[in-house]
Image (cartoon, grey):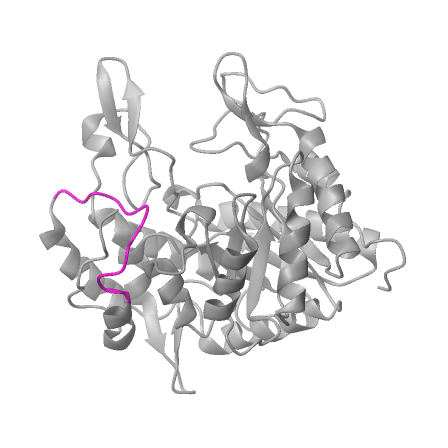
């Protein structure tokens, strides 16, 4: 786990100095780092993908969600392809978010904040650096801003030019949202907000911008999050998020201790600002009960965090022939349990974080779908719910008994 190098051109100097030299997990092994400074400079010179005004608007909505005025649906691809950011692709993803939002609004009586895993969900953390292939091994696929999924050495070699391609694709997606009337300037009820895991530092750091309130924000997305593998408080990722004025989120799994979560809250939300920090629980259906002491610790410490349920990542299994899949019954079970565990410990589940696709796919098991090798299984990393399956999952999110909408 090398530290993040001292950056060159294209970085906010204050934040760059705070991040440089800190442990940086899940970063690619670039063959030639001398190719990165021009990439950083290009990203830094581009206009922001999202405005600071829109970031503030989302922050205010999340603060109201923390008070129970809204519920949240955050959904989209596991790894977003840069080739699927055209207007027709974005329109179908927005339609999926609308369907899921309607299901949640009907079940709760609450208006819904719609957030897409889109316009930047191009990088993925992986369990191993290498993948076994016939005749040897290759660097693992880390998302289209790093390398390509094709099992050839030339495709799997990390290529800094892909970082620029990612920015161009993200801008195309943001422009498509604007063209649909669902982006900048849209009413809160119609707005689709962008989010992604802020993983690839060579993509994120050059897009930090100063704003009129004398602070900094990440202009690559409205709502960045940190994954379970990069949530260490001494890491470059957490330090970056701590210095931003975006609302931020962090995935929390069953290996997290109460002390670790409290440390994260202290670093990411030192002023206990409603709407600032969301904790996304990803425990798995068999371990949701282990969330309870974390919820109690956060509440007792006075942190006004939003809690969301990610029922996907703790429920990944393999089929007999080695395909990664998830079972819809386990996903629905985790949603029901998460809502109850939070309510029983004076918390509230504000909504769902799903990996889902509007495409006709068969990557997860349930609702008449059985994953098998073929055209219906197109996952490049983790299996996604089909729209029918995602609707079934969203229908299992509910307000706890006795809650007032």
Q: Nearer the viewer, residue 81 or 226?
A: 226
Extreme bottom residue here? 213
**Residue in the image at 52% along x and 58% along y:** 259
**Residue in the image at 67% along x and 66% along y:** 299
Q: What are the residue bounds of the magenta stretch? A: 19-31
Q: Please provide percent x and percent y for residue 246.
A: 48, 71
Q: Is residue 275 above or below residue 100?
A: below
**Residue in the image at 63% along x and 61% along y:** 297
**Is 104 on the left or on the right of 370, as rendered?**
right
Q: Which image quarter holds the C terminus?
A: bottom right
The answer to which image quadrant residue 294 occupies is bottom right
Q: Is residue 35 above or below residue 134?
A: below
Q: Nearer the viewer, residue 266 or 247?
A: 266
Residue 398 in magenta stretch: no
The answer to which image quadrant residue 170 occupies is bottom left
Q: Please provide percent x and percent y for residue 49.
A: 40, 66
Q: Is residue 355 above or below residue 326?
A: below
Instruction: Let me know if residue 55 appears in the view.
Output: yes
Instruction: Let me know if residue 45 appears in the view.
Output: no
**Residue in the image at 76% along x and 52% along y:** 104
**Is 76 on the left or on the right of 61, as rendered?**
left
Q: Nearer the viewer, residue 230 or 259?
A: 259
Q: Nearer the viewer, residue 61 or 19?
A: 19
Secondary structure mostly taken by the magenta-highlighted segment of the chain: loop
Q: Is residue 131 above or below residue 74?
A: above
Q: Please provide percent x and percent y for residue 105.
A: 78, 56
């Amino acid at each position: 786990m090398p530290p993040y190098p001292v950056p060159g051109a294209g970085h906010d100097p204050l934040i760059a100095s705070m991040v440089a030299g800190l442990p940086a997990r899940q970063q690619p092994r670039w063959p030639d780092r001398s190719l990165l400074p021009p990439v950083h400079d290009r990203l830094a010179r581009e206009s922001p993908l999202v405005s600071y005004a829109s970031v503030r608007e989302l922050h205010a909505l999340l603060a109201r969600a923390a008070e129970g005025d809204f519920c949240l649906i955050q959904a989209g691809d596991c790894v977003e392809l840069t080739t699927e950011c055209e207007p027709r692709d974005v329109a179908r993803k927005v339609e999926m978010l609308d369907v899921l939002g309607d299901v949640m609004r009907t079940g709760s009586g609450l208006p819904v904040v719609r957030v897409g895993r889109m316009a930047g969900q191009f990088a993925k953390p992986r369990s191993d650096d290498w993948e076994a292939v016939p005749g040897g091994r290759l660097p693992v696929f880390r998302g289209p801003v790093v390398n390509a999924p094709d099992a050839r050495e030339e495709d799997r070699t990390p290529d800094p030019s892909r970082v620029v391609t990612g920015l161009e694709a993200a801008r195309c997606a943001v422009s498509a949202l604007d063209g649909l009337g669902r982006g900048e300037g849209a009413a809160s009820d119609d707005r689709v907000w962008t989010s992604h895991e802020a993983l690839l530092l060579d993509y994120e750091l050059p897009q930090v911008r100063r704003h009129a309130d004398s602070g900094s924000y990440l202009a690559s997305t409205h709502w960045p999050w940190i994954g379970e593998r990069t949530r260490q408080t001494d890491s470059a990722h957490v330090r970056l998020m701590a210095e931003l004025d975006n609302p931020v989120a962090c995935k929390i799994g069953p290996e997290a201790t109460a002390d670790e979560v409290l440390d994260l809250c202290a670093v990411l939300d030192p002023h206990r600002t409603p709407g600032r920090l969301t904790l996304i629980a990803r425990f798995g259906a068999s371990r949701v009960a282990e969330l309870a002491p974390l919820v109690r610790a956060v509440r007792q410490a006075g942190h006004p965090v939003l809690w969301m349920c990610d029922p996907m990542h703790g429920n990944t299994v393999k089929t007999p022939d080695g395909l990664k899949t998830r079972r819809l019954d386990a996903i629905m079970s985790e949603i029901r349990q998460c809502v109850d565990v939070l309510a029983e410990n004076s918390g509230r589940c504000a909504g769902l974080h799903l990996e889902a696709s509007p495409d006709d796919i068969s990557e997860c098991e349930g609702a008449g779908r059985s994953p098998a090798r073929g055209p219906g299984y197109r996952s490049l990393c983790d299996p996604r719910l089909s729209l029918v399956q995602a609707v079934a999952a969203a229908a299992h999110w509910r307000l706890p008994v006795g809650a007032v909408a």
